[in-house]
Image: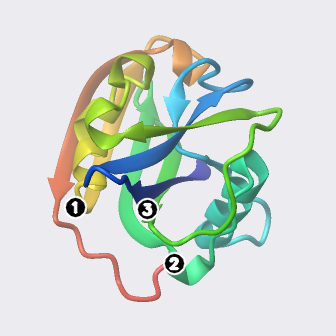
Amino acid sequence: MRETTLCFPMRERSDDGTEVLLIEKRRGLGEGWYNGPGGKLEAGETPRECAVRETREEVGLEVEPGALEKAGELTFLLDGEAHTFCHVYRTRSFTGEPTTSDEAYPEWVAVDDVPYEQMWDDDHLWLPGVLEGKTVAGEFRFEGGKPLDKAEFVGHDLEWGVSFAAGQK
């Protein structure tokens, strides 16, 4: 099973609204869809280190590992087998301005306007809660072949208000 991260940088708008930085994937799994910056852990890398690196590589923002708030742990099953385990983080502390990369086109989006119709089928189930400050553990089931972005979403289980141990990856 592969281990991945997602990071959701957030900021306040001048009109009292909140925005989240999403990326439109330009290549790879989920190409053309929106998500947060993130990707696969490299050998010897902690999930926090991965989230920091992927956010820097994909959109050019610098985030300190300690500024990441653990918001979720998501398990994705494909045809009944564990496929991906994803650590989800959010942060309001970062430096730099988002820039386009070969992999991602970044875009600030009002939390109320997140384009769930252009995202993974499961995102609308857990991401609104994460953007509201909640924590979640979830399992999402897909069937019908590989790659995962071509499979059909068939079910899920969610647990809200999960406590992640202080200092946890």
Decide which of tag 3 and tag 1 comes sooner along the chain. Answer: 3
Q: Residue furthest right?
A: 102
Measured in 3D between alpha carbons, the distance from the residue under mark 2 to the one under mark 1, in whole angstroms, is 16 Å
Q: How many marks?
A: 3
Instruction: Look at the numbered disc 1 and give the secondary structure of its residue.
Output: loop
Q: Which residue is mark 3?
A: 90
Percent across and percent down for residue 31 are 64, 20
Instruction: Look at the numbered disc 2 and give the secondary structure of its residue.
Output: helix
Decide which of tag 2 and tag 1 comes sooner along the chain. Answer: 2
Residue 67's disc is 2
Q: Nearer the viewer, mark 2 or mark 1?
A: 2
**Which of these two is toward me, 68 or 17?**
17
**Which of these two is toward me, 4 or 105?**
105
Mark 2 is surrounded, within 10 Å at the Cα level, by few (under 14), some (14 to 19) or many (20 or more) other residues, namely some
Residue 70 appears left or right of 59: left
Q: Is 141 located above or below residue 2 in the figure?
A: above
